[in-house]
Image (cartoon, rainbow, N blue to C red):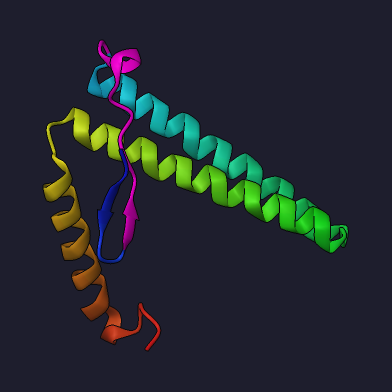
């Protein structure tokens, strides 16, 4: 089920029978929903940091943010797939975006 490349596991778009009737608009709305959930998870983390929460709570909240961010990436993959952008093309777009970002702003976007 998961797509694997040399750099790790790629998000797998939700494209099973449950989503058979979804349009690209439906997928884009799902992206917005998931990004909203990521923002809410991050808001909770920031609040916990402000009130100096314990390490256990902070670790749980960071994991929540990571989960929601990953869920957002998956929703975006579904949106792209709904537009007919296959896995190989999505990976190629990502490589090109990474390469572009690596050279922009005096090559200061990525750590050396």
Residue drawn 24% across the image and 17% down it: 23
Reply above or below: 11 against 94: above
- Residue 3: x %, y % from top left: 27, 47
Reply above or below: 112 against 86: below
Reply above or below: 28 against 110: above
- Residue 25: x %, y % from top left: 28, 21
* Mark count: 0
> Toward which corner of the image does residue 5 lie, by quadrant?
bottom left
Residue drawn 38% across the image and 25% down it: 29
- Residue 72: x %, y % from top left: 44, 41
Q: Is residue 12 left or right of residue 53?
A: left
In the rendered view of the protein, which quadrant contains the N terminus?
A: top left
- Residue 8: x %, y % from top left: 33, 61
> Toward which corner of the image does residue 39 lie, by quadrant?
top right
In the rendered view of the protein, which quadrant contains the C terminus?
A: bottom left
Residue drawn 43% across the image and 32% down it: 32
Residue drawn 12% across the image and 49% down it: 88
Reply above or below: 82 against 35: above
Outermost residue to the top: 21
Query: Which contiguous range is marked in magenta?
Result: 8-21
Residue 47 covered by magenta stretch: no
Q: Is residue 17 left or right of residue 73?
A: left
Q: Is residue 1 left or right of residue 31?
A: left
Residue 12 covered by magenta stretch: yes
């Amino acid at each position: 089920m998961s797509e694997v490349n040399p750099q790790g596991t790629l998000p797998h778009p939700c494209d099973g029978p449950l989503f058979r009737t979804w349009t690209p608009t439906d997928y884009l709305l799902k992206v917005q929903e998931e990004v909203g959930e990521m923002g809410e998870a991050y808001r909770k983390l920031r609040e916990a940091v402000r009130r100096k929460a314990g390490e256990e709570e902070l670790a749980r909240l960071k994991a929540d943010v990571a989960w929601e961010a990953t869920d957002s990436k998956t929703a975006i993959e579904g949106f792209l797939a709904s537009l007919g952008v296959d896995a190989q093309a999505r990976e190629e777009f990502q490589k090109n975006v990474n390469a572009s970002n690596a050279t922009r702003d005096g090559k200061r976007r990525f750590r050396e």
